Image (tube, grey):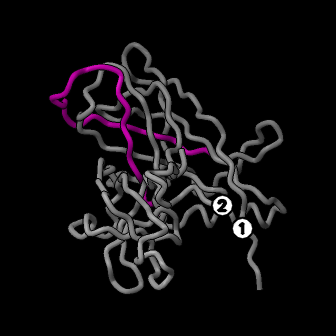
Amino acid sequence: MATVLLTSCLDGNNESSLNGIGVIDYSDDFRTVAYIDDYTPVYSPVFKDLKTGDCIYFTSTYSSDDPANNGSNKYVTVTNAVVTNKIDNDGYFNSQLDTANIKPGEITALNAGLLYATQYSYTLKNYLFVGSSHEKVPADQDNTYFLEYDYSQEPQTVDGKRVYDFFLRIVKNADGKGVVGTNPFNYAFNTHGYFKTLQSKETAAGNETLNIRINYIKEFNKDTTAATWAKSQIYQTQILKETN
């Protein structure tokens, strides 16, 4: 799911809803803003108490009639902003891939996939946003998230596409207090620019797109010593060509 931008006319004004994932950082004039892609900062006083690197989901209203949006600022100003969720961004993104061993407390998933992607990027300020659904868990369960990969991996060929694999691991730390049911968990990983490496690799191979997928544990054997892995859909972005 990419950053959500919903537009609707309100009372004839040039207003629209601007809702989506954001990463907190500073604008060029040192205001605390939420970036909704790598180049678009959004300003609201609501963001002032957040820290750089915080990952959020927010709702807001954008008006092109607002004098603050007359082009004099290097950011978009919104009103009625509400941070509806802070997204866990303490997950581990690492190249210590070991699918043979089960981590203590590891849990299965019904599905998994990306929450954010644009035409040219899977990440927002280097954060990769991932979501998964789980049975018989409270929504506030405390987990640790891992996304593992082989740094030197060669892509798999799937339907003529070169696809890079990432392996999601979710470890339960403690039970929550919410109602137990089928619930989603959303989280983010700081990828430290790794996808630039993959893009360069694909460009060197003469390709104009990058394809990835998320592998996740669907079930364990009876004594939880081995796992059956499932795969998400394949996600594709174009590789932005550098211009001189």
The residue nearer to you, when weighing 154 against 244, is 244
Task: Say which amino acid is labelled 2.
Answer: Tyr
In which quadrant of the rendered view does residue 183 lie? top left
Residue 233, x across and y down, in percent: 63, 35
Does the magenta portion include 199?
no
> Which residue sits at x=34%, y=55%?
56
Q: Is residue 70 above or below residue 210?
A: below
Q: Which residue is mark 2?
A: 120
Residue 133, x across and y down, in percent: 42, 29
The residue nearer to you, when weighing 172 against 221, is 172
| Residue sitting at the far front | 12
Whether residues under marks 2 and 1 lie with C-beta atoms below 8 angstroms apart, the answer is yes
> Which residue sits at x=42%, y=71%?
66
Evaluate whether residue 93 shows in this view.
Answer: no
Q: Is residue 40 left or right of residue 33?
A: right
Within 10 Å of the Cα at label 2, are there few (<14), some (14-19), or many (20+) other Cα atoms?
some
Q: Is residue 187 left or right of residue 112?
A: left
Residue 180, x across and y down, in percent: 25, 20
Magenta range? 165-191
> Which residue sits at x=48%, y=24%?
218
Separation of residues labelled 2 and 1 (CA atoms): 6 Å
Q: Which residue is mark 1?
A: 240
